[in-house]
Protein backbone atom coordinates (compact mmCIF):
# COMPACT_ATOMS: atom_id res chain seq x y z
CA UNK A 1 0.00 0.00 0.00
CA UNK A 2 1.31 3.41 -1.02
CA UNK A 3 -0.23 6.39 0.78
CA UNK A 4 -0.30 9.70 -1.05
CA UNK A 5 -2.28 12.84 -1.75
CA UNK A 6 -5.14 14.21 0.32
CA UNK A 7 -5.71 12.15 3.48
CA UNK A 8 -8.25 13.35 6.04
CA UNK A 9 -7.80 13.02 9.79
CA UNK A 10 -11.51 12.67 10.49
CA UNK A 11 -13.29 14.45 13.32
CA UNK A 12 -15.77 12.39 15.35
CA UNK A 13 -19.34 13.81 15.40
CA UNK A 14 -21.29 13.70 18.65
CA UNK A 15 -24.97 14.40 19.32
CA UNK A 16 -26.13 17.25 21.55
CA UNK A 17 -26.41 14.65 24.33
CA UNK A 18 -22.76 13.66 23.86
CA UNK A 19 -23.28 10.30 22.17
CA UNK A 20 -21.78 9.24 18.86
CA UNK A 21 -23.76 10.71 15.98
CA UNK A 22 -23.60 7.77 13.59
CA UNK A 23 -25.76 9.31 10.81
CA UNK A 24 -23.51 12.40 10.87
CA UNK A 25 -20.44 10.14 10.74
CA UNK A 26 -21.86 8.41 7.68
CA UNK A 27 -22.50 11.78 6.01
CA UNK A 28 -18.93 12.85 6.74
CA UNK A 29 -17.58 9.64 5.23
CA UNK A 30 -19.74 10.05 2.14
CA UNK A 31 -18.64 13.66 1.70
CA UNK A 32 -14.99 12.57 1.76
CA UNK A 33 -15.64 9.83 -0.78
CA UNK A 34 -17.55 12.15 -3.11
CA UNK A 35 -14.79 14.77 -2.94
CA UNK A 36 -12.03 12.37 -3.98
CA UNK A 37 -10.20 12.13 -0.67
CA UNK A 38 -7.48 9.50 -1.05
CA UNK A 39 -7.45 7.99 2.46
CA UNK A 40 -8.90 8.68 5.90
CA UNK A 41 -7.75 8.34 9.50
CA UNK A 42 -10.31 7.16 12.06
CA UNK A 43 -9.82 7.93 15.76
CA UNK A 44 -6.68 10.00 15.55
CA UNK A 45 -6.12 13.08 17.69
CA UNK A 46 -8.56 15.08 15.51
CA UNK A 47 -11.07 12.27 16.12
CA UNK A 48 -10.78 12.74 19.90
CA UNK A 49 -9.45 9.21 20.28
CA UNK A 50 -8.66 9.73 23.96
CA UNK A 51 -12.34 10.48 24.62
CA UNK A 52 -13.70 7.36 22.89
CA UNK A 53 -14.78 4.17 24.62
CA UNK A 54 -13.81 0.84 23.08
CA UNK A 55 -17.26 0.12 21.66
CA UNK A 56 -17.39 3.59 20.09
CA UNK A 57 -13.97 3.13 18.53
CA UNK A 58 -15.11 -0.18 17.09
CA UNK A 59 -18.32 1.29 15.66
CA UNK A 60 -16.53 4.23 14.04
CA UNK A 61 -13.95 1.98 12.43
CA UNK A 62 -16.43 -0.69 11.35
CA UNK A 63 -18.64 1.92 9.71
CA UNK A 64 -15.71 3.54 7.90
CA UNK A 65 -14.53 0.17 6.59
CA UNK A 66 -18.05 -0.71 5.43
CA UNK A 67 -18.54 2.61 3.64
CA UNK A 68 -15.05 3.19 2.25
CA UNK A 69 -13.25 -0.15 2.24
CA UNK A 70 -11.88 -1.01 -1.19
CA UNK A 71 -12.35 2.58 -2.36
CA UNK A 72 -9.64 4.22 -0.27
CA UNK A 73 -7.36 3.11 2.56
CA UNK A 74 -8.82 3.39 6.06
CA UNK A 75 -6.19 4.06 8.72
CA UNK A 76 -6.91 3.57 12.40
CA UNK A 77 -5.29 5.59 15.15
CA UNK A 78 -3.85 2.99 17.53
CA UNK A 79 -1.05 4.74 19.41
CA UNK A 80 -1.06 4.43 23.20
CA UNK A 81 1.41 5.38 25.95
CA UNK A 82 2.40 1.73 26.41
CA UNK A 83 3.73 -0.69 23.79
CA UNK A 84 1.62 -3.69 24.82
CA UNK A 85 -1.56 -1.58 24.74
CA UNK A 86 -0.60 -0.20 21.33
CA UNK A 87 -0.14 -3.73 19.99
CA UNK A 88 -3.50 -4.79 21.40
CA UNK A 89 -5.26 -1.76 19.90
CA UNK A 90 -3.56 -2.34 16.55
CA UNK A 91 -4.68 -5.97 16.52
CA UNK A 92 -8.24 -4.88 17.26
CA UNK A 93 -8.11 -2.42 14.36
CA UNK A 94 -6.81 -5.17 12.10
CA UNK A 95 -9.69 -7.44 13.11
CA UNK A 96 -12.14 -4.64 12.28
CA UNK A 97 -10.75 -4.31 8.76
CA UNK A 98 -8.42 -1.31 8.92
CA UNK A 99 -5.81 -1.11 6.17
CA UNK A 100 -3.05 0.42 8.30
CA UNK A 101 -2.37 1.86 11.74
CA UNK A 102 -1.37 5.46 12.42
CA UNK A 103 0.79 5.14 15.54
CA UNK A 104 1.70 8.31 17.39
CA UNK A 105 4.83 8.46 19.54
CA UNK A 106 3.78 7.32 23.05
CA UNK A 107 2.16 10.35 24.69
CA UNK A 108 3.31 11.71 28.05
CA UNK A 109 5.97 9.07 28.84
CA UNK A 110 8.71 10.72 26.74
CA UNK A 111 10.73 7.66 25.69
CA UNK A 112 14.31 7.92 24.44
CA UNK A 113 15.10 7.41 20.77
CA UNK A 114 16.16 3.84 21.63
CA UNK A 115 12.80 3.36 23.30
CA UNK A 116 11.02 4.61 20.18
CA UNK A 117 12.97 2.17 18.02
CA UNK A 118 12.00 -0.74 20.26
CA UNK A 119 8.38 0.44 20.52
CA UNK A 120 7.74 0.78 16.81
CA UNK A 121 9.56 -2.40 15.88
CA UNK A 122 7.41 -4.33 18.36
CA UNK A 123 4.18 -2.79 17.02
CA UNK A 124 5.21 -3.44 13.42
CA UNK A 125 6.18 -7.03 14.24
CA UNK A 126 3.19 -7.94 16.40
CA UNK A 127 0.29 -5.56 15.61
CA UNK A 128 -0.90 -7.21 12.42
CA UNK A 129 -1.12 -4.02 10.33
CA UNK A 130 1.23 -1.84 8.28
CA UNK A 131 2.38 1.03 10.47
CA UNK A 132 2.54 4.75 9.72
CA UNK A 133 4.74 6.60 12.20
CA UNK A 134 3.32 9.81 13.63
CA UNK A 135 5.47 12.54 15.14
CA UNK A 136 3.69 15.45 16.84
CA UNK A 137 5.86 16.57 19.78
CA UNK A 138 3.59 19.51 20.63
CA UNK A 139 0.98 16.99 21.78
CA UNK A 140 3.07 14.07 23.01
CA UNK A 141 6.14 15.69 24.58
CA UNK A 142 8.34 13.42 22.48
CA UNK A 143 10.18 14.23 19.25
CA UNK A 144 11.18 11.35 16.97
CA UNK A 145 14.26 12.63 15.18
CA UNK A 146 15.00 11.90 11.50
CA UNK A 147 17.82 9.47 12.31
CA UNK A 148 15.36 7.31 14.24
CA UNK A 149 12.85 7.53 11.40
CA UNK A 150 15.59 6.43 9.02
CA UNK A 151 16.29 3.30 11.06
CA UNK A 152 12.58 2.48 11.25
CA UNK A 153 11.92 3.17 7.58
CA UNK A 154 13.74 0.01 6.54
CA UNK A 155 11.34 -2.21 8.49
CA UNK A 156 9.19 -4.11 6.00
CA UNK A 157 5.96 -3.33 7.89
CA UNK A 158 6.56 0.40 8.46
CA UNK A 159 5.21 2.22 5.42
CA UNK A 160 5.49 5.93 6.15
CA UNK A 161 5.56 8.86 8.54
CA UNK A 162 3.20 11.69 9.32
CA UNK A 163 5.48 14.53 10.41
CA UNK A 164 3.67 17.40 12.14
CA UNK A 165 6.70 19.59 12.80
CA UNK A 166 6.58 22.52 10.41
CA UNK A 167 10.25 23.53 10.36
CA UNK A 168 11.72 23.42 6.88
CA UNK A 169 14.88 21.64 7.99
CA UNK A 170 12.84 18.78 9.46
CA UNK A 171 11.27 17.89 6.12
CA UNK A 172 14.59 18.40 4.35
CA UNK A 173 16.01 15.67 6.59
CA UNK A 174 13.05 13.31 6.04
CA UNK A 175 12.49 13.61 2.29
CA UNK A 176 15.61 11.59 1.37
CA UNK A 177 13.99 8.63 3.18
CA UNK A 178 11.15 8.42 0.63
CA UNK A 179 10.96 5.17 -1.30
CA UNK A 180 8.27 3.19 -3.05
CA UNK A 181 7.63 1.40 0.23
CA UNK A 182 8.00 4.40 2.58
CA UNK A 183 5.93 7.58 2.26
CA UNK A 184 6.71 10.96 3.81
CA UNK A 185 3.50 12.80 4.67
CA UNK A 186 2.98 16.28 6.08
CA UNK A 187 0.91 16.61 9.23
CA UNK A 188 0.76 20.41 9.07
CA UNK A 189 -1.80 22.01 6.76
CA UNK A 190 -0.22 25.49 6.46
CA UNK A 191 3.10 24.09 5.18
CA UNK A 192 1.77 21.10 3.24
CA UNK A 193 2.04 22.73 -0.19
CA UNK A 194 5.64 23.69 0.43
CA UNK A 195 6.63 20.17 1.42
CA UNK A 196 4.68 18.49 -1.39
CA UNK A 197 6.35 20.76 -3.92
CA UNK A 198 9.64 19.65 -2.36
CA UNK A 199 8.71 16.01 -2.90
CA UNK A 200 6.53 14.84 0.01
CA UNK A 201 3.89 12.27 -0.88
CA UNK A 202 0.88 14.04 0.59
CA UNK A 203 -0.72 15.38 3.75
CA UNK A 204 -2.82 14.02 6.59
CA UNK A 205 -5.06 17.03 7.00
CA UNK A 206 -7.49 18.57 9.47
CA UNK A 207 -8.70 21.21 6.99
CA UNK A 208 -9.88 18.57 4.52
CA UNK A 209 -12.71 17.68 6.91
CA UNK A 210 -14.46 20.84 5.70
CA UNK A 211 -12.88 21.46 2.26
CA UNK A 212 -12.24 17.95 0.93
CA UNK A 213 -12.72 18.77 -2.77
CA UNK A 214 -10.48 21.82 -2.58
CA UNK A 215 -7.82 19.91 -0.70
CA UNK A 216 -7.82 17.14 -3.30
CA UNK A 217 -7.25 19.75 -6.04
CA UNK A 218 -4.51 21.41 -3.98
CA UNK A 219 -2.69 18.12 -3.45
CA UNK A 220 -3.02 17.12 -7.09
CA UNK A 221 -1.50 20.39 -8.22
CA UNK A 222 1.32 20.36 -5.68
CA UNK A 223 2.27 16.75 -6.36
CA UNK A 224 2.24 17.46 -10.11
CA UNK A 225 4.72 20.32 -9.59
CA UNK A 226 2.16 23.03 -10.43
CA UNK A 227 3.50 25.53 -7.91
CA UNK A 228 1.43 28.47 -9.15
CA UNK A 229 -1.83 26.53 -9.17
CA UNK A 230 -1.22 24.97 -5.76
CA UNK A 231 -0.25 28.29 -4.22
CA UNK A 232 -3.42 29.97 -5.49
CA UNK A 233 -5.54 27.40 -3.66
CA UNK A 234 -3.25 27.53 -0.64
CA UNK A 235 -3.73 31.28 -0.46
CA UNK A 236 -7.49 30.86 -0.62
CA UNK A 237 -7.26 28.58 2.42
CA UNK A 238 -4.98 30.82 4.49
CA UNK A 239 -7.78 32.16 6.72
CA UNK A 240 -9.04 28.62 7.30
CA UNK A 241 -5.57 27.48 8.37
CA UNK A 242 -5.36 30.37 10.81
CA UNK A 243 -8.83 29.72 12.20
CA UNK A 244 -8.10 26.04 12.80
CA UNK A 245 -5.35 27.13 15.19
CA UNK A 246 -7.23 29.72 17.25
CA UNK A 247 -8.13 27.05 19.85
CA UNK A 248 -6.92 23.48 20.37
CA UNK A 249 -7.73 20.99 17.63
CA UNK A 250 -10.44 19.81 16.98
CA UNK A 251 -12.47 22.63 18.52
CA UNK A 252 -12.40 24.97 15.48
CA UNK A 253 -12.92 22.30 12.80
CA UNK A 254 -15.85 20.84 14.72
CA UNK A 255 -17.42 24.30 14.94
CA UNK A 256 -17.31 24.49 11.13
CA UNK A 257 -18.64 20.94 10.72
CA UNK A 258 -21.52 21.77 13.06
CA UNK A 259 -22.51 24.59 10.69
CA UNK A 260 -22.87 21.85 8.06
CA UNK A 261 -25.06 19.84 10.44
CA UNK A 262 -22.31 17.32 11.19
CA UNK A 263 -22.06 16.94 14.96
CA UNK A 264 -22.95 19.20 17.84
CA UNK A 265 -19.99 19.38 20.14
CA UNK A 266 -17.01 17.87 21.91
CA UNK A 267 -16.30 15.90 25.06
CA UNK A 268 -14.81 17.34 28.21
CA UNK A 269 -12.26 18.62 28.91
CA UNK A 270 -12.61 20.19 25.43
CA UNK A 271 -15.10 23.04 25.30
CA UNK A 272 -17.11 24.48 22.39
CA UNK A 273 -15.58 27.30 20.38
CA UNK A 274 -15.46 30.44 22.49
CA UNK A 275 -17.84 33.26 21.67
CA UNK A 276 -14.95 35.49 20.56
CA UNK A 277 -14.50 33.31 17.44
CA UNK A 278 -18.11 32.47 16.54
CA UNK A 279 -18.58 35.33 14.07
CA UNK A 280 -15.36 34.41 12.29
CA UNK A 281 -16.51 30.79 12.06
CA UNK A 282 -19.80 31.81 10.47
CA UNK A 283 -18.14 34.15 7.97
CA UNK A 284 -15.49 31.58 7.12
CA UNK A 285 -18.09 28.85 6.69
CA UNK A 286 -19.80 30.87 3.96
CA UNK A 287 -16.50 31.45 2.17
CA UNK A 288 -15.36 27.83 2.25
CA UNK A 289 -18.73 26.58 1.03
CA UNK A 290 -18.32 28.81 -2.03
CA UNK A 291 -14.77 27.54 -2.51
CA UNK A 292 -15.95 23.94 -2.31
CA UNK A 293 -18.68 24.57 -4.87
CA UNK A 294 -16.09 25.94 -7.31
CA UNK A 295 -13.78 22.99 -6.66
CA UNK A 296 -16.54 20.48 -7.33
CA UNK A 297 -17.58 22.30 -10.48
CA UNK A 298 -14.01 22.38 -11.76
CA UNK A 299 -13.62 18.65 -11.07
CA UNK A 300 -16.88 17.73 -12.83
Image (tube, grey):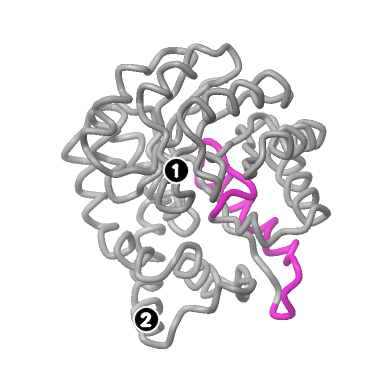
Q: Residue furthest left?
A: 228
Give the Cα distance between marks 2 and 1.
31 Å
Residue on which the image places disc 1: 142
> Which numbered disc, 2 or 1, marks the residue that appears first in the sequence?
1
Left or right: residue 81 versus residue 222 is: right
Q: Is residue 295 above or below residue 21?
A: above
Q: Nearer the viewer, mark 2 or mark 1?
A: 1
Residue on which the image places disc 2: 277
Find the magenta span and give its range.
16-45
Q: Is residue 271 above or below residue 253?
A: below
Q: Is residue 274 magenta?
A: no
Left or right: residue 298 versus residue 248 is: left
Secondary structure at numbered mark 2: helix
Left or right: residue 145 versus residue 230 is: right
Q: Position of residue 8 (x, y in %)?
A: 51, 46
Q: Residue furthest bottom?
A: 275
Amino acid sequence: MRLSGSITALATPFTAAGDLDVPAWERLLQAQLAAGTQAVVVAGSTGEAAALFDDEYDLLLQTAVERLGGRMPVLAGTGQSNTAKTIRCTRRAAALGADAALVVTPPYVRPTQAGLLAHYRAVADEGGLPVVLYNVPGRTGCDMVPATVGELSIHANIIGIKEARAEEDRMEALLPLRREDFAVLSGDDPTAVRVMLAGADGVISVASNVVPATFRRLCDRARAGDAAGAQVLDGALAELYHFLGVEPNPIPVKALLALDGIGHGLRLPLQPLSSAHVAQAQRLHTAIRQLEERSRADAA
